[in-house]
Image (cartoon, rainbow, N blue to C red):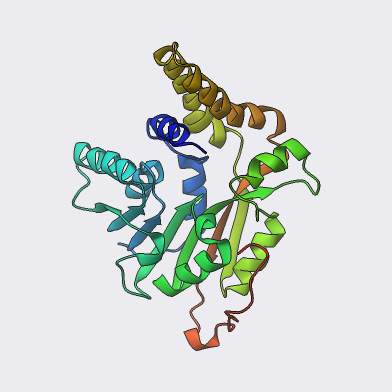
Amino acid sequence: MSERFWTLFFELYEALPRQGPGNRACAERALSLCRLPASPRVLDLGCGVGAQTLYLAELTDGPILAIDSHPPSVERLRATLVSRGLTHRVEALVGDMTESPVEKGSIDLIWSEGALYNLGLERALNLCYELLRPGAYLVFTDAVWLVPDPPAEVRRTFDLDYPTMGTIADDLALVEKCGFELLGHFTLPDEAWWTDFYTPMEQRIEVMRAQYADDDEALAILDQLAEEPALHRVHGGDYGYELFVARRPHADPDDRPEMDPATTSSRA
């Protein structure tokens, strides 16, 4: 993609309430499967502008560390935290998910919406396992195929960003392989795509089209960006986001299945 594409991409996405599907109801449902301590230590990996971080601040009572590699998104979250009086509980940092400034075995809940795939899911799950204390929880969402043979145009679209995307069964196998206990999983409902994500996206694209009305290159890029919600409107049944709730077992870490570093999963 060209530099101009990414400039407009971030201009669009940074203005949205969230950068991927999800909502408060799904967060509440996931947390209902977790028996957290009174003041859990929470780590939000790949927080974006922090829509889910704010849900977590409302639904839990404890310190939250939110990390994202994109500085403008973190700055927007920081401003939101100031305006909502949450800076005493929630800290937003620019950083790499692989270099979290927390001690291994110290986190009660890791939350990550649509971000773990950036590391390769197996690698990300192993990283999360090490950061969680025994008995602690991991909640994450991941894009998955919901049909065995998705249309070619849909597969081509996802191949650009997530060529190793698999099925729910693939993700479940990796959760088990990486030593977690699965507590539950569910596919995000369609409203989790539209209410705070695709509907604001389409509205923002129209605003930007007016802003760049005399810029043919920008208009062409905006048409390209508009293909994503249009595709979901037609093919939303072929793929989805699955939310997984898992737990690091209470057993001694030495009992964890050994991972062969020379072995690469099809989803890694």
State which quadrant residue 101 falls in.
bottom left
Q: Is residue 10 left or right of residue 30?
A: left
Residue that extends furthest to the right in the rendered view of this protein: 149
Residue that extends furthest to the bottom in the rendered view of this protein: 254
State which quadrant residue 44 falls in.
bottom left
Residue at image location 54% in from the left, 56% down from the top: 117
Question: How far across and how far down the image is residue 17, in percent?
Answer: 40, 33
Q: Along the line of sight, which residue is nearer the eye, 17 or 165? A: 165
Q: Is residue 34 left or right of residue 185?
A: left
Residue 135 visible in image: yes
Residue 132 visible in image: no
Question: How far across and how far down the image is residue 11, in percent?
Answer: 39, 30
Say which quadrant the C terminus sits in.
Answer: bottom right
Question: How far across and how far down the image is residue 155, in percent?
Answer: 71, 43
Question: How far across and how far down the image is residue 2, in percent?
Answer: 49, 36
In this rendering, is residue 91 above or below 182? above
Q: Is residue 161 left or right of residue 151?
A: left
